[in-house]
Amino acid sequence: MTPEDSQGSELQEFLDRLDLYGGRLENWPVEPRAAAEALLQVSPEARAQLEAMRRAEAALMQSPGTETSGIDDLASRAMRAAQDRPRQTAMRRLPWAVAGMVALAAGLYVGQLPATGSDGPTEIVTAALDQSGGHDVW
Amino acid sequence: MEDGDDDLIVRVARGDGAAFARLVGRYRARLTAMTTRIIGNRAIAEEIVQEAFTRAWINAPRWKPHGGGRANFGGWLARVATNLAIDHMRRARSVPLDEAAEPVDPAVSADQKLIASEDRRRLDRALAALPPRQKAAIALTYDEGLSNAAGAEVMEISVGAFELLLVRARRALREAMMEDKAQ
C-alpha cells in the first residue's frame, strides 16, 4: 500500500467518523479523536471537510423558529380545536365496553340455542341489545 | 419553585387552562423550531405544533407519569410532532424553497453575515432534499438537543437506526457545503 493509498483510507475513515460524531472533535471518543487530529495536521482535504461540517452545523444551530409570544393564544386555539374531539377518559370508553359485553353475551346465548325456525336469533340479539341500559352504543 | 410537567398535566387533565398554557409556553419554541426544520415551512409547522398540543390536551386524562417530569412529557410531545411532520412531508413530498423559513442572522460583521447567510441558503437547499426521517433526526439532534439514544426513543427506532439516519443526513449536508465551495 502506497502512502497515498494509506492516507486515502484514513481520510475515508475520518469522513465516516465525522458524519457519525459531528464536527466538534471534543465530542469524539478519545482514540478516533487522536487519529483525526493527526490526519488534520497533514491533510488539507480533511481540514476542508471538517470546516464544511462545522459550517453546516453552525447554520443548523441558528434556530429556524424561536418566537415565544402568543402562548395563551396558541393554548386557546389548541383547546378550541379539541372541542370536536372528546377527551380520552375511561368513562368515555364505558359505553363501548358495555356494548362489547352485551354483544359477547348475545353471541354466547345465540350459540347455545337449538336451531329452530324462522325468527330466533335476530329477535334475541335485539332483545339483548335493548338491555344495554340505554347507552348510545352504535 | 417551578411546577413539574407531571403536576401540570394532572391539572390539565382536570381542565385547567392556565396549567395548559404553562406547558405550551415551556415547549412551544423548541417544538416549533424542530418542526420548522423538518417541514421547511413555518406556518405549517405552527399548525402541526398546535395539533400536537391539542392531542396533549385531549390525552391528558390518560397521561401516566413516569416520575421523570419534563423528559417524559417533552419526549412524548416531540414524538407526536415529529410523526405529524413526517406524515405531512410524506403527503406533500416537497415544499418550495421560497416558503422556507428565513433564518435569523446573528449580529456579526457584514462579511460574516454574508457567509452565514450563504451557508444558511446552502443548508436550506440541502435540507429540503433530505428524506423526512433524516430531517427529523437532524431536528431532534440540533433543535431539541437530544442524544442519539433519546432521539431514537422519540422516533421509536433503535439507536443504530437513528445514527444511520444522522450519518446520512450529515453526509449530505457536508457534501452540499463542499460542492458549493467548489463551484
Image (cartoon, grey):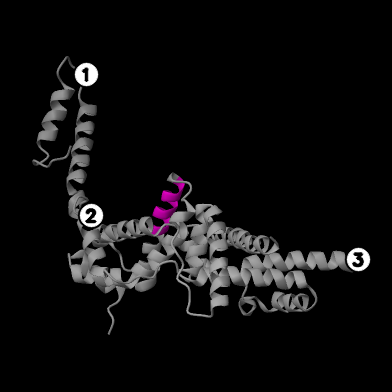
Badge 3 amino acid: Thr
Determine whether, in the image, residue B28 is placed left or right of residue A97.
right
Q: Residue at x 60, y 63 (%)?
A: B170
Q: Is residue A32 magenta?
A: no
Measured Cα–Cα span from mark 1 to mark 2: 52 Å
Q: Is residue B82 magenta?
A: yes
Residue B174 placed where, x, y %? 63, 64
Extreme residue in the front direction: B110
Give the residue pinned by disc 3: A2
Question: In the picture, which quadrant includes the C terminus of chain A?
Answer: top left
Badge 2 amino acid: Ala
Q: Which residue is at the front of the view, B89 or B149? A: B89
Question: Majority secondary structure of the magenta segment?
Answer: helix
Q: Residue under mark 3: which chain is it in?
A: A
User: Which disc number belongs to residue A115?
Assistant: 1
Sequence order check, earlier mark of 1 and 3 = 3
Q: Which residues are magenta?
A: B80-90
Q: In the structure shown, which secondary structural element does the residue marked by tag 2 occupy?
A: helix
Q: Residue under mark 1: which chain is it in?
A: A
Determine whether, in the image, residue B46 is placed left or right of residue A44.
left
User: Which disc number belongs to residue A84?
Assistant: none
Q: Which residue is at the front of the view, A127 or A111? A: A127
Sequence order check, earlier mark of 1 and 2 = 2
Q: Residue at x 80, y 76 (%)?
A: A42
Q: Quadrant of residue B81?
A: bottom left
